[in-house]
Amino acid sequence: MPKIKCKKVTWEEVEEWSRIVSDKVYSSGWTPDVVVAISRGGYVPARLVCDRLVVGELVSLQISHWPSAAQMAKEAGVRTPLYCNMGGKKALIVDDIADTGESLIIAKDHVWTNCRPEAIRIASLQWISGSSKIRPDYYAEEVRGWIWYQYPWSRLEDIIGFVKKVVEENPGKELWSIEELIRGVREWYGVEFDRWFFERALDKLASKGFLKRDGDRIIAKV
Ligand code: AMP
């Protein structure tokens, strides 16, 4: 059993979930004039929803909440604000997942205050119903229990976080092989990735001084 529940998401699933969300918006009879992507997780779903609903206006604001994969920051906050006039328009805010729901709450409040649209609705691919403080108006999947969704647009970033976690959880072990790290990630998260991602993740962690690479030997510096 993996220690952290993780689901590796495929592009096909992203496509399918975006279509489900778009269909729900479409059949509700509420037509958005503008889509607001929450950066960065909402970018890809928002662009797909725009296309599937034929909405020409797409804007974004950045919110920070989960700086590392499956590890939450204390507080969510607007990192890059959005200032534009949405007077008389209906805005659909799109994100990948509502986990605590704080990003969506902050985004909604921010768009109301700064852009003054006529109406706002919220959409996400996943809604973790047990933890989210807000229920999106439209979602593709209700998730019961907690899972880290490993979306394809944050593959490398997440793997960097996973490798870090595996090394940090073994403070007595200084010397690693790449195979041991791949195995460690599989044991912790129950998912597998191409070796390419591990090579890049190790380069990145080495450049940040978290570890050293000496050929196939990886020396942890924690
Ligand atoms: P939150 O404010 O907790 O609803 O989530 C903020 C953002 O963090 C989401 O839009 C995702 O990009 C990321 N995130 C949070 N929880 C998860 C999760 N369980 N799986 C994947 N990504 C997540």
Image (tube, grey):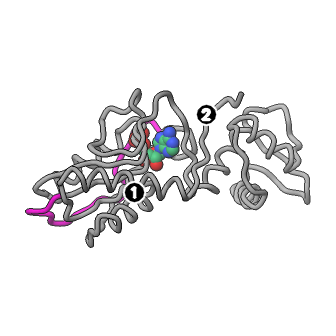
Q: Which residue is drawn at 13% across and 57% down?
A: 117
Disc 1, disc 2: CB below 8 Å? Answer: no
Residue 214 is inside the magenta segment: no
Disc 2 CB within 8 Å of nearest ligand 1 atom = no
Residue, far front: 27
Magenta segment main secondary structure = loop
Q: Residue at x 29, y 64 (%)?
A: 53
Name which residue type carries label 1. Arg
- Quarter holding the C terminus? top right
Residue 69 at what x, y percent from top left?
57, 44
Residue 172 at what x, y percent from top left?
84, 31
Mark 1 element type: helix
Q: Mark 2 points at which residue?
A: 5
Q: Which residue is drawn at 26% across and 68% down?
A: 55
- Highlighted range, magenta: 73-90
Q: Quadrant of residue 128?
A: top left
- Quarter holding the N terminus? top right
The answer to whether residue 66 of the structure is visible from this angle is no
Residue 110 at what x, y percent from top left?
23, 51
Mark 1, Cα crowd under 10 Å, few <14 / some 14-19 / many 20+, is many
Q: Name the residue under label 1.
A: 19
Could you tell whether 85 is left or right of 147 in the image?
left
Nearest to the observer: residue 162 or residue 122: 122
Residue 4 at what x, y percent from top left?
63, 32
Q: Nearer the viewer, mark 1 or mark 2?
A: 1
Q: Which residue is drawn at 35% across and 59% down?
A: 37
Could you tell whether 144 is left or right of 213 in the image?
left
